[in-house]
Amino acid sequence: MINTALIVLAAGMGTRMKSGIPKVLHKAAGRSLLGHVLTGTAALAAKQTVIVVGPDMETVGQEAQLYVPGSAIAIQTKRLGTGHAVLAARESLAGFSGIVIVVYADAPLISAASIAKLIGKTDGNTPLAYLAFEAENPTGYGRLLTGPGETIKSIREELDATPEERAITLCNSGIIAVQSDVLWKYLPLVKGNNAKGEIYLTDLAELVAKSGARVGYSTCPETEVAGINDRVQLAGIEATLQAGYRNRAMLDGATLIAPETVYFSADTKIGKDVTIEPNVFFGPGVTVADDVRILANCHIEGAAIAKGARIGPFARLRPGARIGEDAHIGNFVEVKTSVIGKGVKANHLSYIGDASVGAGSNIGAGAITCNYDGYEKHVTEIGSNVFIGSNTALIAPVRIGDGANVAAGSVIGADVPADSLAITRSELRVKEGWAARYRKMKQARKAAARKG
Ligand code: UD1
Ligand code: MG
């Protein structure tokens, strides 16, 4: 297997995003653009990864560590062009020998398959290859000036191109595969004598070709190398990703009644024979096992839902919610950092936070775990086969033993032993005939007032 190293260019300011955060940290399908590029290229198993960032972009480096722990961060202090950015990564790759891949962090749809195909274009005689695409509208892209036998003689940027060259539709995606020794030999020789005065990575093509070596290329669909400059394009990429995730979920055996209304995150995992009704949003970190039904209008993030469970309609599962097999989480029930046991039913209007609920327990309508005292969070432990009556407040920290019965409307501020009844209710008083007497008195007063 060929040794590969990955350089990710992420030094761009992203001014058109009109944002306080670097462009590549903006998210599509719950994952940063940088995260998409790093997961999309993970299958290449690069030996080393270098992220080229601008000054004051520590957060980009931190994000990279989440996806590729130990990746190097190189700082390009001045933004002097794509070639200059690659040179900034040189020190981090000292000692590396093999194929260097350069990708852009703001083009999140790139696939490892296209890069593998590109790597396949390099060989002993072809130390450099560019990933190209047929552009529907080539304006703004570098054009490939090709020679015989699928070779590149040179790449011409828009501003430097003649009208004839501008008519070319075979364009540079910016992604390259290059042998490390050739890269570091020729890239320092690239001069900024172009319209922008920048050090262009594209100019490497002509230098290498003139040295007598072959410069090759492969192609991929234009959609795969689409870059993002503004939030309209970000929304476009989001739509592309969502369409793909919806199809994948359906082809993997889930029924989506109205697929265009369901939003997945890049890491959502959906099992087989899962039914998802309209208007369901999956934030990051959700796993849904087989045979689960998610009824309409649910918001779910950071949750694991076990086989056969039924969620919603109108349920909210927050990070750390683990819903057991065949459990029912119904309308207007919110679950956070809680383990819900097998077959538990919490069907209406509840908040279950920082809790565990044992198998077979029933949480009545309006029951609340009071997990926060204004300063700290506390845990509620509910055993198995417990009955929590409606409108109960469980003041954490508190434990309810197996098989206990908590009467409706109770406020539970101390542990309840197994198999006992807990009830905090003021005595019921019934005054027979009181309402009739009261009504008569009030009606009489009203009538007297009208006469007077
Ligand atoms: C570049 C290519 C062009 C190609 C196009 C595809 C060059 C000279 N041109 O043009 O042939 O068709 O991409 O989209 O390579 N970056 C840095 N530091 C810099 C400059 C750029 O990190 O100093 C990064 C940017 O953040 C971005 C990428 O490199 O991720 C591309 O830069 P950009 O300015 O968008 O290049 P284009 O002019 O679009
Ligand atoms: Mg660009």
Image (cartoon, grey):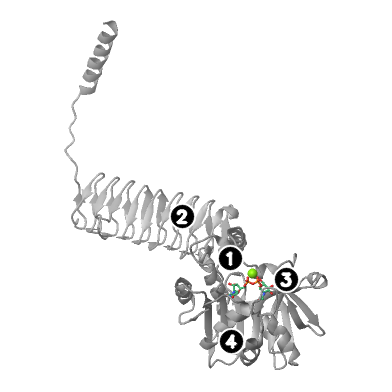
Labels 3, 2: front one:
3
Asked if one can make out residue 273 in the rendered structure from this viewpoint, the answer is: yes
Q: Dot 2 corresponds to which residue?
A: 299
Q: Quadrant of the C terminus?
A: top left
Is disc 1 surrounded by few (<14), some (14 to 19) or many (20+) residues within 10 Å?
some
Q: Amino acid at mark 4?
A: Thr
Q: Dot 1 corresponds to which residue?
A: 252
Q: Real-space Cα distance between discs 3 and 4?
A: 33 Å
Q: Earlier in the sequence, mark 1 or mark 2?
A: 1
Q: Amino acid at mark 3?
A: Leu
Q: Real-space Cα distance between discs 1 and 2?
A: 22 Å
Q: Real-space Cα distance between discs 1 and 3?
A: 47 Å
Pick whichever, 293 or 30, lies toward us.
30
**Residue at x 46% of width, y 82% of height:** 70
Q: Which residue lies most toward the top here?
A: 451
Is disc 4 surrounded by few (<14), some (14 to 19) or many (20+) residues within 10 Å?
many
Residue 227 at x, y percent in the picture: 63, 67
Q: Amino acid at mark 1?
A: Asp
Work out whether 100 lies above or below 434.
below
SS at mark 1 in the image: loop
Q: Amino acid at mark 2?
A: His
**Residue at x 54% of width, y 57% of height:** 263
Is disc 3 surrounded by few (<14), some (14 to 19) or many (20+) residues within 10 Å?
some
- Confirm or deny contact between disc 1 and disc 3 (CB under 8 A): no
Is disc 2 surrounded by few (<14), some (14 to 19) or many (20+) residues within 10 Å?
some
- Left or right of 381: which side holds 187? right
Pick whichever, 6 or 445, lies toward us.
6
Q: Real-space Cα distance between discs 4 and 1?
A: 32 Å
Labels 4, 1: front one:
4
Asked if one can make out residue 382 in the rendered structure from this viewpoint, the answer is: no
Q: Which mark is residue 159?
A: 3
